[in-house]
Amino acid sequence: MTNQPRTMPSTPDRPTLTLTQPDDWHLHLRSGEVLRHVLPYSTRHFGRAIVMPNLQPPVVTCADAAAYRAEINAALPAGSRFQPLMTLYMTEQTEPAEVQRGFESGEISAVKLYPAGATTNSAAGVTNLQNIYPVLATMQAIGMPLLVHGEVVDSEVDIFDREAVFIEKKLQPVRAHFPELNIVFEHITTRDGVEYVQSCDQYTAATITPHHLVINRNALLVGGIKPHYYCLPVAKRETHRLALVAAATSGDKRFFLGTDSAPHLDGAKESACGCAGIFNVANTLSIVTEVFEWAGALDQLEGFLALNGAAFYGLAPNPNKITLQRHKAPLALPEKLVLPAGEITPFDPQLDLHWQVV
Ligand code: NCD
Ligand code: ZN
Protein backbone atom coordinates (compact mmCIF):
# COMPACT_ATOMS: atom_id res chain seq x y z
CA MET A 1 0.00 0.00 0.00
CA THR A 2 1.26 3.45 -0.75
CA ASN A 3 -0.55 5.26 2.05
CA GLN A 4 1.39 5.32 5.28
CA PRO A 5 0.06 4.07 8.58
CA ARG A 6 -0.83 6.72 11.09
CA THR A 7 0.88 6.40 14.42
CA MET A 8 -0.90 3.98 16.69
CA PRO A 9 -2.23 5.46 19.91
CA SER A 10 -0.02 4.42 22.82
CA THR A 11 -1.06 0.89 23.60
CA PRO A 12 0.05 -1.94 25.82
CA ASP A 13 2.63 -4.34 24.45
CA ARG A 14 0.13 -6.69 22.83
CA PRO A 15 -2.99 -4.63 22.05
CA THR A 16 -6.23 -6.51 21.56
CA LEU A 17 -9.54 -5.63 19.97
CA THR A 18 -12.79 -7.33 20.92
CA LEU A 19 -15.62 -7.08 18.41
CA THR A 20 -19.01 -8.56 17.66
CA GLN A 21 -18.43 -11.68 15.57
CA PRO A 22 -18.29 -10.68 11.86
CA ASP A 23 -20.39 -11.90 8.95
CA ASP A 24 -19.36 -12.35 5.34
CA TRP A 25 -21.94 -10.82 3.01
CA HIS A 26 -20.53 -12.38 -0.20
CA LEU A 27 -18.91 -15.80 -0.20
CA HIS A 28 -18.28 -18.58 -2.72
CA LEU A 29 -18.17 -21.93 -0.94
CA ARG A 30 -18.37 -24.18 -4.04
CA SER A 31 -19.38 -27.81 -3.44
CA GLY A 32 -17.92 -31.29 -2.91
CA GLU A 33 -14.22 -31.53 -2.03
CA VAL A 34 -13.56 -27.82 -2.38
CA LEU A 35 -16.46 -26.94 -0.07
CA ARG A 36 -15.21 -29.39 2.56
CA HIS A 37 -11.72 -27.88 2.44
CA VAL A 38 -12.58 -24.18 2.39
CA LEU A 39 -15.59 -24.10 4.73
CA PRO A 40 -13.61 -24.31 8.03
CA TYR A 41 -11.80 -21.07 7.13
CA SER A 42 -15.14 -19.27 7.13
CA THR A 43 -16.71 -21.02 10.11
CA ARG A 44 -13.82 -20.37 12.49
CA HIS A 45 -14.29 -16.57 12.30
CA PHE A 46 -17.65 -15.71 10.77
CA GLY A 47 -21.12 -16.13 12.21
CA ARG A 48 -23.00 -16.10 8.91
CA ALA A 49 -22.31 -15.76 5.22
CA ILE A 50 -24.34 -14.91 2.16
CA VAL A 51 -23.55 -17.92 -0.02
CA MET A 52 -23.25 -17.27 -3.73
CA PRO A 53 -25.34 -19.48 -6.04
CA ASN A 54 -23.00 -19.71 -9.05
CA LEU A 55 -22.50 -23.46 -8.87
CA GLN A 56 -22.62 -25.61 -11.97
CA PRO A 57 -25.55 -25.97 -12.47
CA PRO A 58 -26.59 -22.78 -10.66
CA VAL A 59 -28.87 -22.62 -7.63
CA VAL A 60 -32.09 -21.44 -9.25
CA THR A 61 -34.91 -22.89 -7.16
CA CYS A 62 -35.72 -23.13 -3.47
CA ALA A 63 -35.21 -26.89 -3.76
CA ASP A 64 -31.71 -26.34 -5.19
CA ALA A 65 -30.91 -23.98 -2.32
CA ALA A 66 -32.24 -26.42 0.28
CA ALA A 67 -30.04 -29.18 -1.15
CA TYR A 68 -27.03 -26.87 -1.19
CA ARG A 69 -27.68 -25.72 2.38
CA ALA A 70 -27.87 -29.36 3.47
CA GLU A 71 -24.53 -30.07 1.78
CA ILE A 72 -22.95 -27.08 3.56
CA ASN A 73 -24.43 -28.02 6.91
CA ALA A 74 -23.18 -31.60 6.51
CA ALA A 75 -19.66 -30.23 5.94
CA LEU A 76 -19.65 -27.95 9.01
CA PRO A 77 -16.94 -28.67 11.57
CA ALA A 78 -18.34 -30.35 14.70
CA GLY A 79 -19.99 -27.87 17.05
CA SER A 80 -20.01 -25.01 14.53
CA ARG A 81 -22.95 -22.63 14.70
CA PHE A 82 -22.12 -21.01 11.37
CA GLN A 83 -25.24 -20.12 9.39
CA PRO A 84 -25.19 -20.19 5.60
CA LEU A 85 -27.64 -17.63 4.20
CA MET A 86 -28.80 -18.94 0.87
CA THR A 87 -29.31 -17.03 -2.37
CA LEU A 88 -30.94 -17.79 -5.70
CA TYR A 89 -29.29 -17.20 -9.06
CA MET A 90 -31.44 -14.89 -11.19
CA THR A 91 -32.23 -16.07 -14.68
CA GLU A 92 -34.68 -14.69 -17.20
CA GLN A 93 -36.95 -17.59 -16.22
CA THR A 94 -36.94 -16.91 -12.45
CA GLU A 95 -40.50 -16.99 -11.14
CA PRO A 96 -41.68 -14.20 -8.82
CA ALA A 97 -43.71 -16.76 -6.83
CA GLU A 98 -40.62 -18.98 -6.24
CA VAL A 99 -38.59 -16.04 -4.99
CA GLN A 100 -41.40 -14.85 -2.72
CA ARG A 101 -41.96 -18.32 -1.27
CA GLY A 102 -38.25 -18.69 -0.52
CA PHE A 103 -37.95 -15.30 1.14
CA GLU A 104 -41.11 -15.53 3.19
CA SER A 105 -40.22 -19.00 4.50
CA GLY A 106 -36.78 -17.74 5.52
CA GLU A 107 -35.03 -20.26 3.26
CA ILE A 108 -33.68 -17.65 0.83
CA SER A 109 -32.08 -14.36 1.87
CA ALA A 110 -31.53 -12.67 -1.48
CA VAL A 111 -31.34 -13.10 -5.25
CA LYS A 112 -28.05 -12.65 -7.12
CA LEU A 113 -28.01 -10.97 -10.50
CA TYR A 114 -25.15 -11.89 -12.82
CA PRO A 115 -25.13 -10.19 -16.20
CA ALA A 116 -24.75 -13.18 -18.57
CA GLY A 117 -21.05 -13.66 -19.33
CA ALA A 118 -19.74 -11.25 -16.68
CA THR A 119 -17.84 -13.72 -14.49
CA THR A 120 -17.30 -17.33 -13.39
CA ASN A 121 -20.41 -19.48 -14.03
CA SER A 122 -22.54 -16.56 -15.19
CA ALA A 123 -23.62 -17.99 -18.54
CA ALA A 124 -27.14 -18.62 -17.21
CA GLY A 125 -27.41 -15.02 -16.02
CA VAL A 126 -29.48 -12.16 -17.36
CA THR A 127 -29.07 -10.44 -20.72
CA ASN A 128 -32.15 -8.23 -20.83
CA LEU A 129 -32.91 -6.69 -17.45
CA GLN A 130 -36.46 -5.84 -18.47
CA ASN A 131 -37.21 -9.55 -18.53
CA ILE A 132 -36.71 -9.69 -14.76
CA TYR A 133 -38.80 -6.63 -13.91
CA PRO A 134 -41.72 -8.77 -12.66
CA VAL A 135 -39.35 -10.53 -10.22
CA LEU A 136 -37.86 -7.19 -9.14
CA ALA A 137 -41.36 -5.80 -8.53
CA THR A 138 -42.10 -8.71 -6.19
CA MET A 139 -38.75 -8.34 -4.44
CA GLN A 140 -39.33 -4.64 -3.89
CA ALA A 141 -42.80 -5.34 -2.47
CA ILE A 142 -41.54 -7.96 0.02
CA GLY A 143 -38.24 -6.23 0.90
CA MET A 144 -35.98 -8.92 -0.53
CA PRO A 145 -32.46 -7.76 -1.44
CA LEU A 146 -31.14 -7.91 -5.01
CA LEU A 147 -27.39 -8.58 -5.08
CA VAL A 148 -25.79 -7.20 -8.20
CA HIS A 149 -22.60 -8.13 -10.01
CA GLY A 150 -22.13 -4.66 -11.45
CA GLU A 151 -20.26 -5.00 -14.72
CA VAL A 152 -21.42 -4.66 -18.30
CA VAL A 153 -20.26 -7.36 -20.67
CA ASP A 154 -20.23 -5.45 -23.98
CA SER A 155 -17.06 -6.32 -25.83
CA GLU A 156 -16.51 -2.69 -26.82
CA VAL A 157 -16.32 -1.57 -23.17
CA ASP A 158 -12.84 -1.71 -21.67
CA ILE A 159 -12.69 -4.16 -18.77
CA PHE A 160 -11.44 -1.43 -16.43
CA ASP A 161 -14.54 0.69 -17.24
CA ARG A 162 -17.16 -2.01 -16.96
CA GLU A 163 -18.29 -1.10 -13.45
CA ALA A 164 -18.66 2.61 -14.21
CA VAL A 165 -20.59 1.91 -17.40
CA PHE A 166 -22.83 -0.57 -15.56
CA ILE A 167 -23.88 2.13 -13.11
CA GLU A 168 -25.01 4.44 -15.85
CA LYS A 169 -26.46 1.97 -18.34
CA LYS A 170 -27.95 -0.72 -16.08
CA LEU A 171 -28.12 0.19 -12.42
CA GLN A 172 -29.57 3.67 -12.69
CA PRO A 173 -32.50 2.55 -14.89
CA VAL A 174 -33.31 -0.31 -12.48
CA ARG A 175 -33.09 2.05 -9.53
CA ALA A 176 -35.32 4.62 -11.26
CA HIS A 177 -37.92 1.92 -11.91
CA PHE A 178 -37.72 0.37 -8.43
CA PRO A 179 -36.90 3.21 -6.01
CA GLU A 180 -37.42 1.09 -2.87
CA LEU A 181 -35.78 -2.16 -3.98
CA ASN A 182 -33.01 -3.16 -1.57
CA ILE A 183 -29.89 -3.40 -3.74
CA VAL A 184 -26.42 -4.54 -2.72
CA PHE A 185 -23.87 -3.44 -5.29
CA GLU A 186 -21.47 -6.34 -4.77
CA HIS A 187 -17.70 -6.08 -4.53
CA ILE A 188 -17.36 -2.50 -5.73
CA THR A 189 -13.94 -1.67 -7.10
CA THR A 190 -14.09 1.96 -8.20
CA ARG A 191 -14.48 5.50 -6.97
CA ASP A 192 -17.53 5.59 -9.28
CA GLY A 193 -19.07 2.72 -7.31
CA VAL A 194 -18.39 4.44 -4.00
CA GLU A 195 -19.82 7.75 -5.20
CA TYR A 196 -22.87 6.06 -6.68
CA VAL A 197 -23.71 4.40 -3.35
CA GLN A 198 -23.07 7.64 -1.48
CA SER A 199 -25.47 9.43 -3.83
CA CYS A 200 -28.27 6.94 -3.04
CA ASP A 201 -30.57 6.55 -0.06
CA GLN A 202 -30.84 3.73 2.48
CA TYR A 203 -32.04 1.20 -0.12
CA THR A 204 -28.57 0.90 -1.71
CA ALA A 205 -25.52 -0.61 -0.05
CA ALA A 206 -22.24 -2.13 -1.24
CA THR A 207 -19.89 -4.88 -0.24
CA ILE A 208 -16.15 -4.35 -0.36
CA THR A 209 -13.60 -7.19 -0.50
CA PRO A 210 -10.36 -7.42 1.49
CA HIS A 211 -8.32 -7.75 -1.69
CA HIS A 212 -9.70 -4.60 -3.29
CA LEU A 213 -8.78 -2.73 -0.09
CA VAL A 214 -5.11 -3.67 -0.45
CA ILE A 215 -4.20 -4.27 -4.08
CA ASN A 216 -4.43 -2.25 -7.24
CA ARG A 217 -3.95 -3.53 -10.77
CA ASN A 218 -0.17 -3.42 -10.46
CA ALA A 219 -0.37 -6.52 -8.23
CA LEU A 220 -1.75 -8.40 -11.21
CA LEU A 221 0.48 -7.05 -13.96
CA VAL A 222 3.84 -5.76 -12.70
CA GLY A 223 6.89 -8.02 -12.76
CA GLY A 224 5.08 -10.84 -14.58
CA ILE A 225 1.42 -11.78 -14.80
CA LYS A 226 0.18 -12.93 -11.39
CA PRO A 227 -2.91 -15.08 -11.79
CA HIS A 228 -3.60 -15.28 -8.05
CA TYR A 229 -4.44 -11.56 -8.14
CA TYR A 230 -6.97 -12.00 -10.93
CA CYS A 231 -10.57 -11.64 -9.89
CA LEU A 232 -13.68 -9.98 -11.21
CA PRO A 233 -14.31 -7.16 -11.08
CA VAL A 234 -10.61 -6.79 -11.80
CA ALA A 235 -8.56 -4.59 -9.44
CA LYS A 236 -8.34 -1.00 -10.69
CA ARG A 237 -5.96 1.96 -10.29
CA GLU A 238 -4.64 3.12 -6.93
CA THR A 239 -7.04 6.09 -6.83
CA HIS A 240 -9.93 3.64 -6.82
CA ARG A 241 -8.39 1.55 -4.05
CA LEU A 242 -8.02 4.68 -1.95
CA ALA A 243 -11.69 5.51 -2.52
CA LEU A 244 -12.66 2.03 -1.33
CA VAL A 245 -10.54 2.37 1.81
CA ALA A 246 -12.09 5.76 2.53
CA ALA A 247 -15.61 4.36 2.10
CA ALA A 248 -15.00 1.23 4.19
CA THR A 249 -13.41 3.18 7.05
CA SER A 250 -15.83 6.14 6.92
CA GLY A 251 -18.46 4.73 9.24
CA ASP A 252 -21.10 4.99 6.48
CA LYS A 253 -23.43 2.07 7.27
CA ARG A 254 -24.04 1.33 3.59
CA PHE A 255 -20.58 -0.22 3.21
CA PHE A 256 -19.80 -3.65 4.66
CA LEU A 257 -17.54 -6.66 4.20
CA GLY A 258 -18.18 -9.22 1.50
CA THR A 259 -15.02 -11.24 1.04
CA ASP A 260 -15.92 -12.57 -2.42
CA SER A 261 -13.58 -15.38 -1.44
CA ALA A 262 -13.70 -17.47 -4.59
CA PRO A 263 -11.44 -20.55 -4.51
CA HIS A 264 -10.18 -22.18 -7.68
CA LEU A 265 -7.61 -24.97 -7.89
CA ASP A 266 -4.17 -23.61 -8.80
CA GLY A 267 -4.26 -25.49 -12.09
CA ALA A 268 -7.32 -23.51 -13.14
CA LYS A 269 -5.72 -20.20 -12.17
CA GLU A 270 -2.19 -20.78 -13.43
CA SER A 271 -3.35 -21.33 -16.97
CA ALA A 272 -3.38 -19.72 -20.42
CA CYS A 273 -7.00 -18.81 -19.64
CA GLY A 274 -7.02 -18.54 -15.87
CA CYS A 275 -10.19 -18.40 -13.76
CA ALA A 276 -11.19 -15.23 -11.91
CA GLY A 277 -11.37 -15.50 -8.15
CA ILE A 278 -9.22 -15.00 -5.05
CA PHE A 279 -9.35 -17.28 -2.00
CA ASN A 280 -8.98 -14.86 0.90
CA VAL A 281 -10.94 -16.06 3.94
CA ALA A 282 -7.84 -17.54 5.55
CA ASN A 283 -6.58 -14.03 6.37
CA THR A 284 -9.50 -11.66 5.73
CA LEU A 285 -9.83 -10.37 9.28
CA SER A 286 -6.08 -9.77 9.61
CA ILE A 287 -6.08 -7.81 6.35
CA VAL A 288 -9.12 -5.69 7.06
CA THR A 289 -7.96 -4.86 10.57
CA GLU A 290 -4.54 -3.84 9.25
CA VAL A 291 -6.21 -1.54 6.71
CA PHE A 292 -8.39 0.08 9.36
CA GLU A 293 -5.36 0.54 11.62
CA TRP A 294 -3.44 2.25 8.79
CA ALA A 295 -6.43 4.48 8.17
CA GLY A 296 -6.64 5.41 11.86
CA ALA A 297 -10.16 3.99 11.88
CA LEU A 298 -10.14 1.00 14.21
CA ASP A 299 -13.21 2.52 15.86
CA GLN A 300 -15.16 1.88 12.62
CA LEU A 301 -13.99 -1.72 12.21
CA GLU A 302 -16.87 -3.39 14.05
CA GLY A 303 -19.44 -1.55 11.94
CA PHE A 304 -17.82 -2.66 8.68
CA LEU A 305 -17.25 -6.26 9.78
CA ALA A 306 -20.19 -7.05 11.99
CA LEU A 307 -22.96 -4.43 12.22
CA ASN A 308 -23.67 -2.63 8.95
CA GLY A 309 -24.39 -5.71 6.84
CA ALA A 310 -26.65 -7.29 9.44
CA ALA A 311 -28.61 -4.05 9.71
CA PHE A 312 -29.06 -3.85 5.94
CA TYR A 313 -30.34 -7.43 5.85
CA GLY A 314 -32.65 -6.74 8.81
CA LEU A 315 -30.83 -9.21 11.07
CA ALA A 316 -29.56 -8.85 14.62
CA PRO A 317 -25.78 -8.76 15.04
CA ASN A 318 -24.19 -12.05 16.10
CA PRO A 319 -24.35 -12.67 19.86
CA ASN A 320 -20.73 -13.84 20.09
CA LYS A 321 -17.54 -11.79 20.23
CA ILE A 322 -14.15 -12.31 18.67
CA THR A 323 -10.82 -10.93 19.82
CA LEU A 324 -7.94 -9.87 17.61
CA GLN A 325 -4.47 -9.48 19.03
CA ARG A 326 -1.72 -7.35 17.54
CA HIS A 327 1.64 -9.08 17.21
CA LYS A 328 4.88 -7.16 16.87
CA ALA A 329 6.30 -9.51 14.26
CA PRO A 330 4.46 -9.99 10.97
CA LEU A 331 2.27 -13.08 10.74
CA ALA A 332 3.15 -15.96 8.46
CA LEU A 333 1.06 -16.34 5.30
CA PRO A 334 -1.62 -19.05 5.42
CA GLU A 335 -0.48 -22.37 3.97
CA LYS A 336 -1.71 -23.64 0.63
CA LEU A 337 -4.71 -25.96 0.88
CA VAL A 338 -3.92 -29.44 -0.37
CA LEU A 339 -6.86 -31.29 -1.92
CA PRO A 340 -6.87 -34.61 -3.75
CA ALA A 341 -7.51 -32.72 -7.01
CA GLY A 342 -4.85 -30.04 -6.51
CA GLU A 343 -3.90 -27.07 -4.36
CA ILE A 344 -5.58 -23.75 -3.54
CA THR A 345 -3.36 -20.73 -2.91
CA PRO A 346 -4.53 -18.30 -0.22
CA PHE A 347 -4.38 -14.58 -0.94
CA ASP A 348 -1.03 -12.90 -0.28
CA PRO A 349 -1.83 -9.23 0.46
CA GLN A 350 1.76 -8.12 -0.23
CA LEU A 351 1.96 -6.31 3.08
CA ASP A 352 2.88 -7.28 6.62
CA LEU A 353 -0.06 -8.35 8.76
CA HIS A 354 -0.01 -8.16 12.53
CA TRP A 355 -3.56 -8.75 13.76
CA GLN A 356 -4.55 -12.33 14.49
CA VAL A 357 -7.85 -13.69 15.72
CA VAL A 358 -7.24 -15.21 19.15
C1 NCD B 1 -16.17 -15.42 -8.64
C2 NCD B 1 -16.13 -16.94 -8.76
O1 NCD B 1 -15.05 -17.49 -9.00
O2 NCD B 1 -17.17 -17.57 -8.57
N1 NCD B 1 -14.96 -14.88 -9.17
C3 NCD B 1 -14.43 -13.67 -8.90
O3 NCD B 1 -13.42 -13.31 -9.53
N2 NCD B 1 -14.94 -12.88 -7.99
C4 NCD B 1 -17.39 -14.88 -9.32
C5 NCD B 1 -17.69 -13.43 -8.99
O4 NCD B 1 -18.06 -13.11 -7.88
O5 NCD B 1 -17.55 -12.60 -9.89
ZN1 ZN C 1 -18.39 -13.26 -6.01
Image: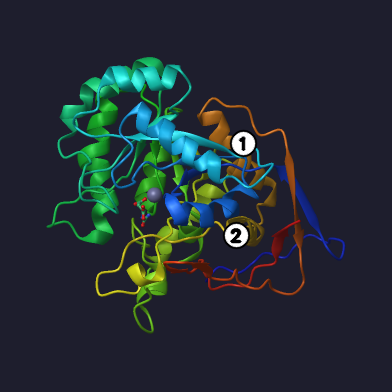
Which of the two residues, 192 or 207, is positioned nearer the viewer here?
A: 207
Element marked by disc 1:
helix
Q: How is the image coloured?
A: rainbow
Quadrant that contains the C terminus = bottom right
Mark nearest the camera among 2 and 1 is: 1
In the rendered image, residue 356, in percent from the top left (x then y), is placed at 71, 61
In the rendered image, residue 157, in percent from the top left (x then y), is placed at 17, 56
- 266 sits left or right of 126 in the view: right
* Residue shown at 27% from the left, 37% from the top: 171
* Residue shown at 30% from the left, 47% from the top: 56
Q: Is mark 2 within 8 Å of ligand 1?
A: no
Mark 1 burial class by Cα count in 10 Å: few <14, some 14-19, many 20+: many
- Name the residue tied to disc 2: 291
* Residue shown at 40% from the left, 39% from the top: 197
* Residue shown at 57% from the left, 46% from the top: 250
Q: How many marks?
A: 2
- Name the residue tied to disc 1: 307
In the rendered image, residue 73, in percent from the top left (x then y), is placed at 54, 39
Q: Quadrant of residue 4?
A: bottom right
- 145 sits left or right of 97 in the view: right
Q: Is residue 100 visible?
A: yes
Say which amino acid is labelled 1. Leu
Q: Find the residue positioned furthest to the right.
A: 12
Comes first in the chain, label 2 or label 1: 2
Q: Is mark 1 within 8 Å of ligand 2?
A: no
Q: CA distance from mark 2 to mark 1?
A: 18 Å
